[in-house]
Image: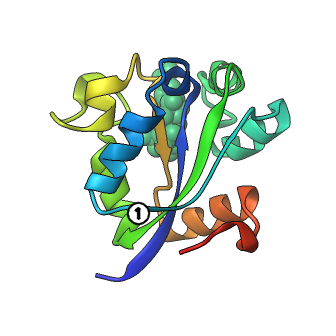
C-alpha cells in the first residue's frame, strides 16, 4: 500500500472531555503517525469554508456553530493507506452505526458531535492539509 497523508480534526466535543490523548492513542495504535498537530479555535469563516461542501444541507449552520464552539486539534496523519485506515479507525458518521472499537462508537456523543473528522479522498486530503498547514509545519 502507498504511503499517504490525511487530514484529521479532533472535534470540540472530544477536546472538551479531555479525549485528545485517547484519540491520539487510537490513531497511533492503528499505525498512523501524527506528523503535524495544532490546537486552535476555528473562526466562523474557516469552519464555513472547510465544510462548504455541506452548505446546502439542513445541518450546515448547526455544524459550523458546533465546530467553533471550542478548541479543535488539527492534525496531519501519515501511514500506509492512511486515508482509508483513518476512516476505518474513526467509524461511521453516526455513532449508532459505528463498528465496535472505533473512535466514534466509543467516544462520539451524536451524529454531529462525533469527535473526529477525516479526509475522505486523496484529493480532499491534499486540499484540507494545505488549507490548515504550511509545508514547514509537517515533519515526517
Ligand atoms: P467528517 O467530514 O467530519 O469527517 O464526517 P463524515 O465524512 O463522516 O460525515 P459528512 O457526511 O462529511 O458530514 C460532516 C459532519 O457533519 C455533521 N453531520 N451532522 N445532523 C446531521 O444529520 C449531521 N450529519 C452530519 C457531523 O459532524 C459530520 O461528521
Ligand atoms: Mg466528510
Residue name at image x 50 percent, y 55 percent: 119
> Is residue 94 depicted above or below 121 in this figure?
above
In the image shown, does 14 or 125 lie closer to the viewer? 14
Q: How is the image coloured?
A: rainbow
Residue name at image x 47 percent, y 34 percent: 20
| Left or right: 29 as drawn, with respect to 36 | left
Residue 31: image quadrant is: bottom left
Residue name at image x 61 percent, y 30 percent: 57
Q: Quadrant of the N terminus?
A: bottom left
Residue name at image x 40 percent, y 80 percent: 3
| Left or right: 44 as drawn, with respect to 54 | right
Residue that protrudes farthest toward the bottom in the picture: 2
Residue 4: image quadrant is: bottom left
> Is residue 43 depicted above or below 123 in this figure?
above
In the image shown, does 77 or 119 lie closer to the viewer? 77
Residue 92 image offset from top left, x and y in percent: 31, 37
Residue 16 image offset from top left, x and y in percent: 55, 19
Label 1 CB-ligand 1 distance < 8 A: no
Total marks shown come to 1
| Left or right: 128 as drawn, with respect to 85 | right
Q: Mark 1 packing: few (<14 Cα in 10 Å), some, or many (20+)? A: many
Residue that protrudes farthest toward the left in the picture: 100
Badge 1 element: helix
> Is residue 102 depicted above or below 66 in this figure?
below
Query: Disc 1 marks which residue?
Result: 83
Residue 100 image offset from top left, x and y in percent: 15, 33
Amino acid at each position: 500500500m502507498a504511503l499517504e497523508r490525511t487530514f484529521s480534526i479532533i472535534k470540540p466535543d472530544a477536546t472538551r472531555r479531555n479525549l485528545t490523548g485517547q484519540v491520539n492513542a487510537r490513531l497511533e495504535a492503528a499505525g498512523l503517525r501524527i506528523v503535524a498537530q495544532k490546537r486552535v479555535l476555528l473562526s466562523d469563516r474557516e469552519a464555513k469554508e472547510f465544510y462548504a461542501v455541506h452548505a446546502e444541507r439542513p445541518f450546515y449552520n448547526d455544524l459550523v456553530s458546533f465546530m467553533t464552539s471550542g478548541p479543535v486539534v488539527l492534525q496531519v496523519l501519515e501511514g500506509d493507506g492512511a486515508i482509508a485506515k483513518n476512516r476505518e479507525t474513526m467509524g461511521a458518521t453516526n455513532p449508532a452505526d459505528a463498528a465496535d472499537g472505533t473512535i466514534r462508537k466509543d467516544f462520539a456523543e451524536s451524529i454531529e458531535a462525533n469527535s473526529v473528522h477525516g479526509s475522505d479522498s486523496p484529493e480532499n486530503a491534499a486540499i484540507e492539509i494545505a488549507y490548515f498547514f504550511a509545508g514547514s509545519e509537517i515533519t515526517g
